[in-house]
Amino acid sequence: MGKKKANVKQEDDINPWHSVSDSGDKLPDESASGTSAKRTSKTCRSATRGTSTRAQSLAPGEGQKTAKMEVPKPYDGIKRGKSAEQWFTRMGLYIVMNKDRFDNKDQALIWILYNMEGKAADWATPIIDDITSNKPGAPKDVKELTARFTAAFSDPDAKRAAGQKIVALQQTTSTADYVTEFRNISVDLDWNDLALQDQFLRGVHWKVKEQIALRDSDPSSIEELFNVAICIDNIRRKNNENCPKRPQPSGQQATTTTTVSTTSTARRVEIEKSPNYVAPEEQDRRRAEGLCVKCGEKGHIFRNCPNGWRTKAKIKTAKVGEDQPEKE
């Protein structure tokens, strides 16, 4: 039985931007085998145009069914900020997954711009004219078009709010959680890489920052800084878990210490409130002037004080009362 050579007829598609799944071509099932599978595989290879390495890595390989991917709905330019960026990202992903449908980069750029309407279409029309006319100001690739699109349809209020959030952001849990939050906020910012690194170090845990400062070389990008910080924090947390914990004082010891301290404080306050209390400064003054330290009078010293630790006011009160005998 002779082998039949599969003939593939290349026809111009009226709408070259339709999804791969709409073409009607079916790739062989993984269970297919034998001559039929080989013929189909050969046919698919002959019909496939050259693609880049990244496109080949993302696109379905031989023997796999093509994943259906719908074309994103046209963008009208009303919702700005994240909505616009998400739409543009989906358009770029569609191009990557269906790169064999575009002969060159200009077709990919025009296709993105063609899928705009309303205010967005008003913005896209002159750019389409620049591309088709090969004008010097036309975007050269998707990256340049992305920059223009972001500048035109970003949300200035979102940038301002994101700037305030990222400045106030501080690490309170793990570094991995901090990186996630930092990354989500920085999406709405147009800061350069060095500015992001500086702000990240301001909010990261001081122990992580300390270890980063001890490194021989600084991280070359914010992504490298993320990875280094997470690695340091993971090691630090693991070491803390393995470190033997110090014995805590028992409840009885803590209670005893607190009781003694409270009792001493209360006793000192009680003594200071006594009418016979003589402050240390007053005692020094009385000694310097030759007075009795106890009663403050002249003519005798501390040891021979006839008045004891009673003040003059106390003595007068005792004489008036005459109820209670004077204690020595």
Image: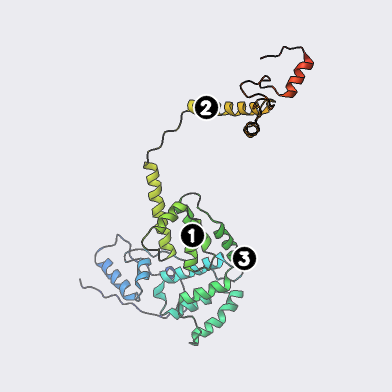
Find numbered disc 2 in the image and state the secondary structure of the residue it sits on.
helix
Q: Residues within 10 Å of mark 3 (few under 14, many from 20)?
A: few
User: Is 255 positioned to the left or the right of 277 in the image?
Assistant: left
Q: Are marks 2 and 3 in contact (CB under 8 Å)?
A: no
Q: Which mark is residue 255?
A: 2
- The residue under the point 42% across, 70% down is 96
Mark 3 = which residue?
Answer: 157
Q: In the image, residue 80 lies at what x, y percent?
A: 59, 68
Marks 1 and 2 sit apart, C-alpha to C-alpha, by: 45 Å
Q: Earlier in the sequence, mark 1 or mark 2?
A: 1
Measured in 3D between alpha carbons, the distance from the residue under mark 2 to the one under mark 3, in whole angstroms, is 57 Å
Tag nearer the camera, 2 or 3: 2
At mark 3, the secondary structure is helix
User: Which numbered tag is attached to residue 200?
Assistant: 1
- For the N terminus, which image quadrant? bottom left
Q: Nearer the viewer, residue 157 or 66?
A: 157
Amino acid type at circle 2 is Thr
Between tags 1 and 2, which lies in front? 2
Q: How many marks?
A: 3
